[in-house]
Image (cartoon, grey):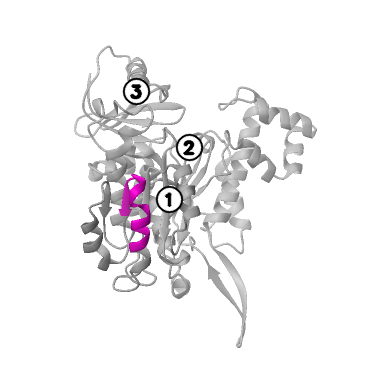
């Protein structure tokens, strides 16, 4: 059997391979295969096993394909540090670009980098360092001095600061350095796309140096990008079809929220400094690796009522239930923890309506990202997909969050039933129109 394209999702524990036809019938998603990720030795071993499993699921003996793409969160995913001039301006813009590209941000600094920061970077061992700072033709010395301080670390670096520094940074002739457009060229202007593209390119070039990834280019000839960045790409495609979208992805270690939307017109003047598309990563909200932290944030009465058991029983359940729950109470536990992850992640991603007192009396103004114009929410990740009543929980949350700038509680909610968002995102970098058609088919979307 010949298919048009395979997309591998190389996770920290599991490798998935999805097969698609984009140019022949039957059009769309054909099937998937699984294997344990073999990052400790060579990821292509697990990749080949996942393809064999795919062949079994398709009930075929032979499988050929024209192209193969991949997303990866293995070997720690994409670790980055970000260094800007003012935390709420250039550093924030660079951080958002990195998050949108799928990075795990381990350090953000503002102003001149100190020796203690250099020590932290050496301990973190990031895959990429981003240096920003200064609007175009504004302050330029801090970003330039930060580049000089970081140049000898031998870590891939991207400069996305004041354009006036380009020539003198080029003259230093730093190995593994990219220079791109300013991520914050003017006050309250986020120019995220050039930096995000550079992060993808740098990730692809250097992924072969990550543990177990040395042979990845033997099989993957197309794009390889971070898995969370790929989910954002899918979210952006969906925004082309439905203006105003949000994706919630509850995983074993983190919960990610992606939103692409304009603010309500009445709040437009307060929205400067908030990006059109935003990703937040909650490192303490995951239903497996960070299960204990989620438990500590869950209302204990809710858990006691659900199980009609004491604290000791619930704690043992948390400690002993595997990643994929095997018992009825284990499934109930994961569902409850998923609800906490969704609630807390939305609380942190979405802005608030706040009361302020002025000379003209009290006013209610927005603070943070306004998602009230979101027309559709998409749920991905196993925890959300296997929670039978998650849509009802989300609608109840939206209805009760009266001080939050959340979508309307009757917003359309869709499940990524086949768990394809991360595959479709990387695929869209080459085949955007075909992915659009596939998404319209998946969710029965009538464009326009």
Disc 3 and disc 2 in contact, CB within 8 angstroms: no
Tag count: 3
Quadrant for the N terminus, please: top left
Which residue does the numbered mark 1 point to in the structure image? 81
Mark nearer the N terminus (1 vs 3):
3
Disc 1 and disc 3 in contact, CB within 8 angstroms: no
Give how far across and how far down residue 253 sits, in percent: 53, 38
Q: Nearer the viewer, mark 3 or mark 2?
A: 3
Which type of secondary structure does the marked residue at label 3 adopt? helix
Which residue does the numbered mark 3 point to in the structure image? 47
In the foreground, 244 or 167: 167
Which type of secondary structure does the marked residue at label 2 adopt? loop
Q: Does 439 appear above or below 269?
A: above
Mark nearer the N terminus (3 vs 2):
3
Q: Nearer the viewer, mark 1 or mark 3?
A: 1
Q: CA distance from mark 1 to mark 3?
A: 30 Å
Residue 283 visible within the image: yes
Magenta stretch in the rendered image: 144-158
Q: Residues within 10 Å of mark 3 (few under 14, many from 20)?
A: many
């Amino acid at each position: 059997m010949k298919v048009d394209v395979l997309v591998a999702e190389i996770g920290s524990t599991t490798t998935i391979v999805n097969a698609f036809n984009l140019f022949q019938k039957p059009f769309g998603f054909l099937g998937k295969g699984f294997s344990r990720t073999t990052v400790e030795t060579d990821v292509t071993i697990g990749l080949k096993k996942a393809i064999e499993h795919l062949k079994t699921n398709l009930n075929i003996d032979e499988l050929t394909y024209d192209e193969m793409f991949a997303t990866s969160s293995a070997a720690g995913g994409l670790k980055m540090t970000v260094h800007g001039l003012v935390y709420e301006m250039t550093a924030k813009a660079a951080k958002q670009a990195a998050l949108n590209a799928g990075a795990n941000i381990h350090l953000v600094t503002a102003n001149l980098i100190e020796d203690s920061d250099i020590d932290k970077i050496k301990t973190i061992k990031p895959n990429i360092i981003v240096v920003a700072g200064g609007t175009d033709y504004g302050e330029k010395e801090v970003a330039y001095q930060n580049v000089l301080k970081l140049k000898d670390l031998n870590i891939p670096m991207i400069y996305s600061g004041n354009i006036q520094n380009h020539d003198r940074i080029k003259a230093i002739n730093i190995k593994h350095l990219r220079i791109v457009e300013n991520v914050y060229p003017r006050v309250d202007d986020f120019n995220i796309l050039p930096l995000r593209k550079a992060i993808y390119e740098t990730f692809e070039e250097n992924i072969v140096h990550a543990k177990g990834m040395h042979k990845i280019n033997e099989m993957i000839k197309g794009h390889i990008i971070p898995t969370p960045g790929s989910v954002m790409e899918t979210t952006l495609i969906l925004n082309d079809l439905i203006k105003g979208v949000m994706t919630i992805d509850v995983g074993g270690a983190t919960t990610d929220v992606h939103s692409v939307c304009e603010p309500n017109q009445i709040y437009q003047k307060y929205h400067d400094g908030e990006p059109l598309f935003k990703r937040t990563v909650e490192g303490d909200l995951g239903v497996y690796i960070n299960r204990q932290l989620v438990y500590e944030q869950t209302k204990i009465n809710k858990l006691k009522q659900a199980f009609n058991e004491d604290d000791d029983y619930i704690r043992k359940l948390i400690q002993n239930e595997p990643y994929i729950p095997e018992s009825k109470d284990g499934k109930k536990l994961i569902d409850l923890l998923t609800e906490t992850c969704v609630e807390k992640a939305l609380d942190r991603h979405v802005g608030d309506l706040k009361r302020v007192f002025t000379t003209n009396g009290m006013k209610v103004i927005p603070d943070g990202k306004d998602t009230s114009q979101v027309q559709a929410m998409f749920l991905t990740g196993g925890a959300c997909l296997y929670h039978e009543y998650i849509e009802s929980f989300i609608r109840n949350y939206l209805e009760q969050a009266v001080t939050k700038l959340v979508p309307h509680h009757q917003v359309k909610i869709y499940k990524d039933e086949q768990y394809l968002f991360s595959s479709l995102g990387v695929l869209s970098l080459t085949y955007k129109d075909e992915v659009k058609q596939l998404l319209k088919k998946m969710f029965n979307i009538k464009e326009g």
